[in-house]
Structures are given as structure tokens and as C-alpha cells.
Image (cartoon, grey):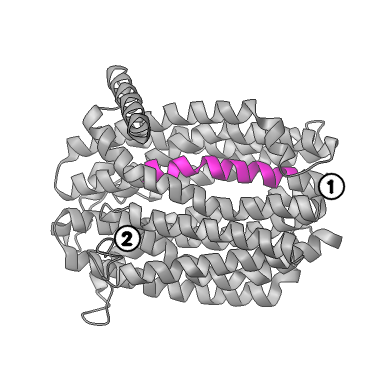
Amino acid sequence: MLSRLREGVARVGEAVAGALDRAGVIDRSRLDETMGLAWPRIVTGFAIMSKNTVDLAVIGYAVGVSAVAGMGYAFAFWQLAKFVSIGLAGGTVSLVSQNYGGDERGRAGLVVKQSLIVSALLVAPIVAGYVLGAERLIALVGGDGAALSAGTTYLAVTAPALAFEFFNMIASRTYAGVGDTRTPMVARAGGALLNVVLTVWLVLGAGLGVFGAGLGTAVSIAAVGLLLAWGMSGRSYFGRGASPVPVGRSGPWFDPGLSRQLLRVSAPLIARRVAEGVVVFPLLWIASSFGDATVAALEVGRRVRALLGSFSWGFSIAASTLVGQRLGAGEESLATAYGRDVIALSAVVYVLASAAVIAAATPIAGAFVDDPAAVSATAAFVVAAAVSAVPLGVDGSITGSLRGAGDTRWPFLASMVGLYVFALPVALLGLVTPLGVGGLYAALVAEKLVPAGLNGFRFRSNRWQAVSRQYRPDAGDAEEEVG
């Protein structure tokens, strides 16, 4: 029976691969490489994004809408810090993949060491600030009453886990840069399962409410960090999963040239991600003017989009790794072909996935809130989030390709335009015009649609290939003027 099922799945896979090839979406051979890297990262993305989503759903069921709103405020601060780690990890995977592709393993390992040092310096003050100032931070965004209490508790409890999350991001991207996305997938998926068990037990079983949800999340993140640390030190998991660029106490930990490259590549990524995180705060403040139910609905919409964004985790990292490795080997035309095919594949996947979410918007909303009016309001945000997920997914593959080349400045500027020139002004219009909550719907779409268009233009220009030449193993510290 099992063998027949496998044969059936294999036949369906072959048919889909053939159809995509004939339609000109992605070459069959590149599809195998892409999915080999992408599917573990997709599972990893769902595992990571499910943590806050599970917390939100359980708290919505056990406590109520105001607690969901409060957790939305806390998530904004958590996400802001996490975006810093994602930006640094993006610079790490760019340099690791190019040096590993150029057969410079020692140099790739040194990149990882320096990334870990930088991450430790960044996360320490963030954790301290969140723990000590949780209540003031939540109140600053607009939280009050039950929402303020819930947000304060959740942020203070989960903040220490950010130290592990920074390490987890660096470790996951290091594995991806050397072509291993399965090891972090297993660790992250295990952490997600542990989070579900702990959250349900602590919230529904032990009756610890928001505190229990935060504690379950913090413990599961720490467990993932300890598990990944084993493989990052060069030790295997039952014969598999040892990092080929291990981190050990021996050998150098600092190289001025590599440090400059890491900071040069990572700084725009960090700035972009931080800007994406910062814009959430005025959006939450705007939503709070319409009441806790709107804040909760906005947060549910953002959580749904984050789950859909898990596909982009896979396609983006596949693009970064494959494009970076081809560029590291000096194969610019092949790098372009890989990037183009991954972008096309992501567009197809996101159109289908978003359509499915739109069709199920009301049942999805009902999993988080139960009041009929709240369900209706939440379903509208779920639809807006699903629509915006299509450009989000396409843009993820485009920026992944650019990131593989070390071209991170343009995506940063594109993101700024989408967020602050389009999304935020549109949302603010809702406060002063009859547009109302509709301004928030439009903002969700604009913040992803505009950068996708601008980054698509950059990819077609091929200027990213010129950028990559200064980061290849034989480039040293050479600088090149690129636009």
C-alpha cells in the first residue's frame, strides 16, 4: 500500500515537473535542485512562523480578543528584533555560499565566526531593553487595559529567547549556504512541535494564559538553538548533518577584509528588515484607533501572510544559494537562468496558495476569534493578506537572487519606497477620510507590491552581476563602482 502511494506521488511529481518545463516556468533539472534546497526551508518556515500563530490561536480561544491584540503588540517588537538577525543572516549566506562555491571552506567558516560575534553584540542590549521596558513599550504603541497586560507579559517572557533565535538564524543560513537545508529543517520542525505541545499544556492544561504561551515559545526556541549548536561545531547527528564549515575555538576569529564585506552586505539587509519592522508600529497605532478587534484582525492577517511567506523562505534561500554558488564559480549566465526560473516558479506557487486562502478566509478567521463581527472583520484582513502574499513571494525570490550576488542596497531602497512612500500614507488616509479600515487593507498590499516591481526591474538590468564580482573568493578587498 505504501509503495503504491509512493509511486503515485512520484508520478504526480513527474507530471508537474514536465508541465512546468513545457510551460517555460522552470527547467526540469533546475527544478530538482531548487526544490531540493527549497522544500526543507519551506517546512522550516512553517515551523518557525507557526510558533506565534499557534500562540495567537490558543490565546484567542482561551482568553479572548483583547489578549490577541496585546500579543499583536508584543509580536511587533519581537519581529523587529528578529528582522535584525534575518538581515545579518542574509549577509552571512551570501558570503558563505560564494566562498563555499569557490572552494574556500576556511574562509567561509571565518565568515560564520564573525557573524556570531556580531549577532551577540546586537542581541544583548535588545533583550535587556525588552525585559526591563516591556510595559512602557507596549503602551507606547497604543496598548491599554487587558491588551497592555497581555502584551507586556508575552514580550517580557519571550525576550530572552531572542539570544537563541539570533544564533538559530545564523546557523540555519550557514547550512543553507553550503547546500544543506534539511538539518535546520529537522531542528526547526522539532521546535515547532515542542512549542505546540508546551503551549497547549501550559495555557489550556495548566491555565497559565499568556504567560504559558510565552514560556512555551521561549523554551522551544532555546531547544532548537542547543540542537543546532551540536552540528555547527562539526559534530554529526547519527552520521549526518555536521557543518562542513564548523565553528571551533581554534583558528582565527577575525579578518578585516571579511569583516568589511560582511558589514557591507549585511547593513542594507538589516536596515531594510528593521524598516519593515518599524512600519508595523504606526500601523498598529492606526488599527488601535478602531478598537482591539481591528488590532486583532490585523495581526491575524499578518500571521496568515507570514505562514504563506514560508514558501518564500524556501525559494529565496534556494535562489541565494544557487545564484551565489554559480557566481562564485564565475558562471554568470547560469546564475541568471537559475534566478529567473526560481522567480517564475514562486509566482505560480503563490497564485495557487493565495487563492486557496482567499476561498477559506472565513473558516481561517474563525480559528482565531469567535464573535461573528470579529470573524467578519478578521476574514477581510485575511483576504487582503493573501492578495499581498503574491508580490511578497515573487519579491522574495528576486531579492534572494540579488542577495546571492551581494546586491543588497537596491532591495533596501525598494522596500523603503513601498513602506514609507506608499503603504504608510495610504493607511493614514483611513484616519482622515471615509476610507477607514480600508486604508489598512490597501497598505498590506502596497508594502509588498511596490518593492516587487522595483526589484524585478533591478534583476532584469543584470547590474547585480557586476556587484557580485567584488565579493567572489578571488576579489580580495577590491572595490568596484556599481550602480
Q: What stretch is highlighted in magenta?
A: 297-316
Q: Nearer the viewer, residue 456 or 386?
A: 386
- Label 1 crowd (10 A; few <14 / some 14-19 / many >=20): few
Q: Give the number of the disc on residue 291.
A: 1
Q: Position of residue 455 (x, y in %)?
A: 41, 37
Q: Which amino acid does label 1 sit on?
A: Gly
Please tell me whether the stretch drawn in magenta is mainly helix, strand or loop: helix
Quadrant (top left, top right, bottom left, bottom right) of the N terminus? top left
On screen, 128 above or below 167? below
Residue drawn 78% across and 36% down? 375
Q: State yes or no: discs 1 and 2 in contact (Cβ < 8 Å).
A: no
SS for tag 1?
loop
Residue at x-position 54% and y-position 38%? 448
Tell me if I can see residue 371 in this picture. yes
Q: Of label 1 and label 2, which has the lower sequence position?
A: 2
Residue type of the residue flagged with mark 2:
Thr
Query: Which mark, residue 174?
Result: 2
